[in-house]
């Protein structure tokens, strides 16, 4: 699936379903917040949420006064849903883009991705993602990436996914990123089904090109 098809797919999802009706909905992003805090997130840092859509992570970050929050998603409708919940939505940087084709104009302290990367099933798209990740993150900064685990669903929203564990993510990200921690997680969908995820935290290595 190319970038145009992906965008059309997700725009259709978010214009035909309520945010609470999709399998990935969670009322509070407790695990994501805990992982970022554990990795050193403080209010003065900048955060970008990749594939954030209508997620409530931006609400939680705004509530604690996060200095700079950006949310990137393919679907303008999803971002409008998130905007409508926030009184100070103008403080958030909203980005309608496919991450694999995005040209960032700044760097961030934290990269968060819950269930976006696993939709990239081709090596070309995965490597495009890594190039953007490397450009966006400052040296020493962290990325929290959540995907379906190896024993998780094979499809989501009608699309095939690439399931991962920490080792397969490390292989894709390469030597410029160091695994900090990983954990398994069971997400309960709005209709009570269990989806098995893994969440891995990576640190961008300074001067990775100089490593032996």
Image: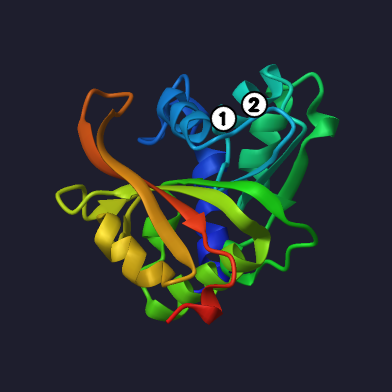
Relative vertical location of residue 25 with respect to residue 13 in this rendering, above or below: above
Q: Residue at x 44, y 23 (%)?
A: 30
Q: Residue furthest left?
A: 151
Q: Residue furthest right?
A: 90
* Quarter occupied by residue 60: top right
- Number of marks in the image? 2
Q: Quadrant of the N terminus?
A: bottom left
Q: Position of residue 3 (x, y in %)?
A: 56, 70
Q: Position of residue 190 (x, y in %)?
A: 33, 24
**On the image, numbered disc 1 is attached to which residue?**
57
**Label 2: how many residues lie within 10 Å, few (<14), some (14-19) or many (20+)?**
some
Q: Residue at x 82, y 23 (%)?
A: 88
Q: Position of residue 156 (x, y in %)?
A: 32, 50
**Does the rendering let one see residue 1?**
no
Residue 172: which numbered mark, if any? none
Name the side, left or right, on which 182 lies relative to 100.
Answer: left
Q: Secondary structure at mark 2?
A: helix
Front residue (pair 210, 69) = 210
Q: Quadrant of the C terminus?
A: bottom left
Name the side, left or right, on which 109 lies relative to 153.
Answer: right
Q: Residue at x 20, y 47 (%)?
A: 152
Relative vertical location of residue 90 with respect to residue 50 in this rendering, above or below: above
- Give the spatial CA distance, label 2 vs label 1: 6 Å
Relative vertical location of residue 157 with respect to residue 195 in this rendering, above or below: below
Q: Secondary structure at mark 1?
A: helix
Name the side, left or right, on which 151 lies relative to 178.
Answer: left
Instruction: Determine whether label 2 and label 1 are within 8 Å by CB.
Output: yes
**Label 1: how many residues lie within 10 Å, few (<14), some (14-19) or many (20+)?**
many
**On the image, numbered disc 2 is attached to which residue?**
61
Front residue (pair 39, 125) = 39
Marks 2, 1: nearer the viewer: 2
């Amino acid at each position: 699936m190319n970038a145009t098809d992906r965008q059309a797919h997700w725009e259709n999802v978010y214009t035909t379903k309520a945010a609470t009706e999709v399998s990935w909905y969670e009322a509070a992003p407790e695990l994501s917040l805990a992982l970022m805090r554990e990795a050193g997130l403080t209010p003065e840092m900048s955060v970008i949420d990749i594939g954030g859509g209508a997620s409530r992570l931006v609400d939680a970050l705004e509530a604690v006064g996060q200095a700079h929050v950006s949310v990137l998603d393919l679907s303008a409708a999803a971002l409008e849903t998130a905007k409508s919940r926030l009184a100070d939505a103008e403080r958030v940087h909203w980005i309608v883009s496919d991450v694999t084709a995005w040209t960032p104009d700044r760097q961030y302290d934290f990269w968060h991705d819950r269930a976006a990367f696993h939709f990239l099933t081709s090596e070309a798209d995965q490597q495009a993602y890594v190039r953007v990740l490397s450009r966006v993150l400052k040296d020493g900064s962290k990325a929290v990436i959540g995907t379906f685990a190896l024993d998780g669903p094979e499809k989501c929203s009608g699309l095939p996914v690439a399931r991962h564990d920490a080792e397969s993510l490390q292989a894709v990200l390469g030597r410029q990123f160091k695994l900090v921690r990983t954990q398994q997680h069971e997400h309960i969908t709005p209709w009570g089904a269990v989806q098995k995820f893994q969440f891995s935290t990576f640190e961008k290595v300074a001067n990775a090109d100089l490593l032996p």
